[in-house]
Image (cartoon, coloured by chain):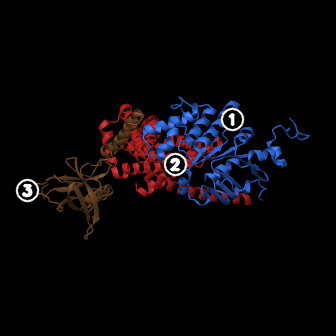
Chain colours: A red, B brown, C blue
Amino acid sequence: MVTVVEDLGWSATRFVVDLGRLARFAAQVARAAVAPPIRVRLFVQEVFKLGVLSLLIVCVCGLAVGMVLSLQGYHTLVRFGAEQSLGAVVGLSLIRELGPVLTGLLATGRAGSATTAEIGTMVATEQLDALRMMSVDPVDLVVTPRALAMVFVMPMLAALFIVFGLFGGYLVGVGLMGVDPGSYMSSLQSAVDFRDDVGGSLLKALIFGVLVGLIATYRGFFAAPTSAGVGAATTSTVVVASVSILIFDYFITALWGV
Amino acid sequence: MSRAPLRDLLVGLFVLAGLGAVAYLSLSVGGLSTHGPGGLPVFADFDEIGGLKPRAQVVISGVKVGQVASIALDDKYRARVKLDLDAHLKLPVDTSASIMTSGLLGDRYVSLQLGGESEILKPGDRIAMTESAVVLERLIGKLVYGGDRGKTE
Amino acid sequence: MVSPSVTNGVRDDPHVELVRVRMAFGDREVFRALSCRFPRGRISVVLGGSGSGKSTVLRLIGGLVRPQAGNIWVDRDDVTRRSERELYAVRKKLGMMFQDGALLDSMTVFDNLAFPLREHTAASEAEITAAVRTSLDAVGLSRVDELLPGQLSGGMVKRVALARAIITRPIILLCDEPFSGLDPVSVKLIEALLVRVNRQLHATMIVVSHHIASTMRMADRVVLLLPDGTVDGTAEELRRSTDPRVVAFLSEDAPPPAPAADARW
């Protein structure tokens, strides 16, 4: 019985220590981001790896989610004779919640885990130590471009997810279920407000980008230098980042006053 | 160009697409206006605003010409609504404002009906003629009780 | 416990020196009070069995790990007293050849070699190309410029790693197991290269290895890490030593210890 309590205490302490280490790591990344040398080429390379290569999955999933929302939404609204508001329902769901959150989760699974594996492997093969011995800060060269790229890319991926979702919703609602196209678009436009909805959505995506960027690089950087360690770090990234996204989603939604 | 011009091109296209999506959502869907706020602030006092919210639309003949900037109580406990209208509007001083409902259960908005005077509203003026919102419960209440009263009188 | 060391006095001035260094990872103590000197411009070899802490010595010198106690002098700088930022300045004098190369696997061989030059010098691309060519020639490699590290054989990786370590003309060169995983021909090749680098660059070299034959041949100084202390001296001195531990370690002709009577397999 006592050992259970002891274990809990240890876990809690380890968690707080981990959090502290993450905060210090984040400060290092931020400092490296603003101090020279500014590594533009590496940043562009990472935007390519994280953004361009995630495009297909984000757009396909966005389309699919929009189509499902439209289908489900129609069946519910038609019971109240309110199917002309379908545009608003699909749009608001996508913009406020599903766009940033699902994009965040997709990016975590695809780009986040890849980042952790890459950096973890560099630790295991002593590449980061080699950088230190060559008087190059591994945080500046390896971590910061990846973290910044993730922050930059996330709002854009989320916006693309939403646009494809709206299109998918249109395809199903107007094309399949026969909702009037004019009503779909006008209900969408009148229901969506820039500051509350789109602004909040982009803010969420930005914050999720920071979360995934930091967690993925942190886990890779401090991975145990074995293949098992890298594997564990990658799994941890996906789990921790996904949970963090969902928890932060609640708090941002509550605080943004939507 | 760096040694991978194709990659840079794709990144550039990606950024364009992303920014384009953001712009579309902000402007077309979200209704962010590229020109600044209206420019013609006028006030209107109502006895009952019935669920009218700030940023609700202000329309003339069904066309949006501005939005509700703020709602407050004046010292006579009437609702003082500040409307932010497009600057180029020329509205006679006897224009009236009514609070309507879009659809049966929809959002409230303000509809303006033009008057006939030659003098036009200037920034900060007050619209004198207003028609308060129709609240469904009171309407039903009038029907239910008003019918009885009609019989007894 | 300070070992009975076999030193040659202070005739060769120490370029790198460990003074009573204690290193422990958690509960596991690697050495309690290690003291040794690496003379300037000479090839020093750190020998020892697996787990004796050989590679740790290099990491301590490079400031990659910090000791629990003791001082480490690298060219008159005590790296135990330096912050991470200050260490970057010290490391500019060092070159390190890692056991598996530690080449940046996303870059070509050319970019790997050019990397330290691009980071720390204002050399033009033409100058960098010339320097890379020279380094690759020095280690006997050609036509590997555009290959990725993953496409190189073990021996080639070691040679590229050596080339990278010397391209900035360091005054102290650290080599972690340069002979590991190589066939006998490649071992001789690397040995020759290391000796040549020492002659041409006059760099102080500290080589960590468990490859007794090659290291005894090329070493000016040998530090033998044993579980109960260190023995250091010239290669000749160690070969003539009567210390039973040294004899046991150096003797490759000795039969392996008999397995326990009840051992299966």
Secondary structure under badge 1?
loop
Quarter of the image for the C terminus of chain C: give it: top right
Whether residue C209 appears in this view of the structure is: yes
Q: Is residue A27 above or below residue A241?
A: below
Disc 1 sits on a residue from what chain? C
Task: Tell me the distance, in whole angstroms, between the alpha carbons under discs 1 and 2.
Answer: 28 Å
Q: Which residue is mark 2?
A: A136
Q: Amino acid at mark 1?
A: Gly
Secondary structure under badge 3?
loop
| Count of marks overlaid on the render | 3
Q: Is residue A20 above or below residue A50?
A: below
Residue A203 lies left or right of residue C147; in this view the side is: left
Q: Amino acid at mark 3?
A: Ser
Q: Residue at x 31, y 51 (%)?
A: B107
Quick one: label 1, few (<14), some, or many (20+) residues within 10 Å? some
Are discs 3 and 1 both within one chain? no
Toward the left, the furthest residue is B118
Q: Which mark is residue B118?
A: 3
Residue A66 lies left or right of residue C18; in this view the side is: left
Q: Position of residue A219 (x, y in %)?
A: 57, 48
Q: Position of residue C244 (x, y in %)?
A: 85, 48
Disc 3 sits on a residue from what chain? B
Task: Tell me the distance, in whole angstroms, between the alpha carbons under discs 3 and 1.
Answer: 98 Å
Q: Residue at x 17, y 62 (%)?
A: B125
Are discs 3 and 2 both within one chain? no
Quarter of the image for the N terminus of chain C: give it: bottom right
Q: Which residue is mark 1?
A: C181
